Amino acid sequence: MGALDGVKVVDLTRVLGGPFATQWLGDHGADVIKIEPPQGDETRFWGPPFEEDSGAASYFLGVNRNKRGMALDLRQPEAREVLRRLLAEADILVENFKPGGMEKWGLGYDTLKHEFPRLIHCRISGFGGDGPLGGLPGYDAVVQAQSGLMSVNGDVGGEGLRLGIPLVDIGTGLSAMIGITMALYEREKSGLGQFIDMTLYDVAVSLLHPHAANWFLGGKTPAPTGNAHPNITPYDVFPTKGAKIYIAAGNDGQFARMCAVIGAEDLLQDPRFSDHPARNGHRAELRAALIPYFAEWDGKELAEALMAKAVPAGPVLDVPAVMNDPHTVHREMAIEVDGLRMLGNPVKMGRTPSDPKRLRPPSFGQDTRAVLAEAGYSQAEIDALIQSGAAIG
């Protein structure tokens, strides 16, 4: 039994942030009912690649396991009544309509809190419902640009670049899950649910460490630093005769041990490199001095030698190498769910472990009839809902 066994989640989210959050809730035991619109979650079609049997895109499959799937047309009053019946038994509602979307159907939090006072209602939006940008649509890459994340990512002297992963969407999903579990804990004391207002913009801004902290204190506008750290050196990618290596020698002890491993003890006597402030003031000189030593090593072998001496270092690997790495497999971070390879769940709980292999991602509307029957609808009523198009399944 997972930590969230017995918790029921109604999931009205699409694309990435919301589905990421609800997948993790499902991994840890929650009963997640994913409700899609008549056209389906758009990420079902965000391919290639597509799974041959289901026809679903990898993008959808990657964030929708451990959910039961149904489809409702919430534009129809009958479908909204179905949703209300589901919410009567639910602990959590997660949705990512634009602010005002649920309200126009009479399903906003100010209405629902009176009908279902224990319900935790989490809304994920781009910018929230108020403020200068309130109500505007938000997309990961656009918010990366607006929040300053792009301005600090990229090559030295270059223009900012979008991060290679949708960090804002994923970070918002993680933050939403944290907020939801905190609200569940608080409800044990108060008996009441609450509204959780999650925005991509807020999360993106919160991720600006240490660049915002540096600007607050020093007043210098942060800029891209390439692979290097803005505050620490050597903390960068270096070439070797094999794989490139990332070395993060963040303090004097680590730097000294690194020099001992590569045979560069003479650098410790150089006043330019005697301590971290000195090294940070002579970044280019230090990099130039280290590269000849690293050129004698293979990156993977050097990383193993450095880590054995407690110097953080690792080879620069591509995605296939990581997915097939023995440690990835050992930690169950590359798993198989009913024939589908997926990422695992990193939250390893000793007494109530997650079960990311419980349910594969649902096909469109696959559980509509079963969920309606559980909610008390008769077979005739279910047939009528599907015939009218209010429900699809």
Image: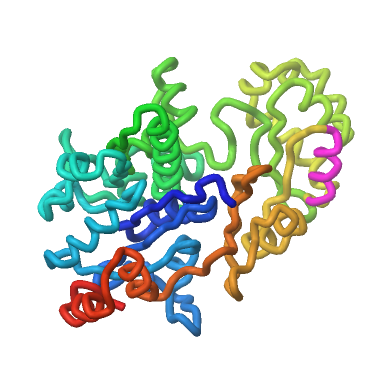
Q: Position of residue 62 (x, y in %)?
A: 49, 64
Report whether 134 appears left or right of 220. left
What is the quadrant of residue 120 in the picture? top left
Query: Magenta stretch containing residue 305, yes or no?
Result: yes
Report whether 247 appears left or right of 81. right
* Prevailing secondary structure of the magenta residues: helix
For residue 130, say whether it is visible.
yes
Query: Foreground residue, 107 or 152?
Result: 107
Above or below for 336 versus 251:
below
Query: Foreground residue, 383 or 36?
Result: 383
Q: Position of residue 309 (x, y in %)?
A: 85, 33
Say which residue appears at 14% left-offset and 48% top-offset: 100
Above or below for 77 versus 212:
below
What is the quadrant of residue 122 in the picture? top left
Query: Magenta stretch containing residue 125, yes or no?
Result: no
Query: Foreground residue, 210 or 185?
Result: 185
Report whether 149 appears left or right of 139. right
* Range shown magenta: 300-309
Say which residue appears at 42% left-offset and 26% top-offset: 212
Say which residue appears at 28% left-offset and 37% top-offset: 195
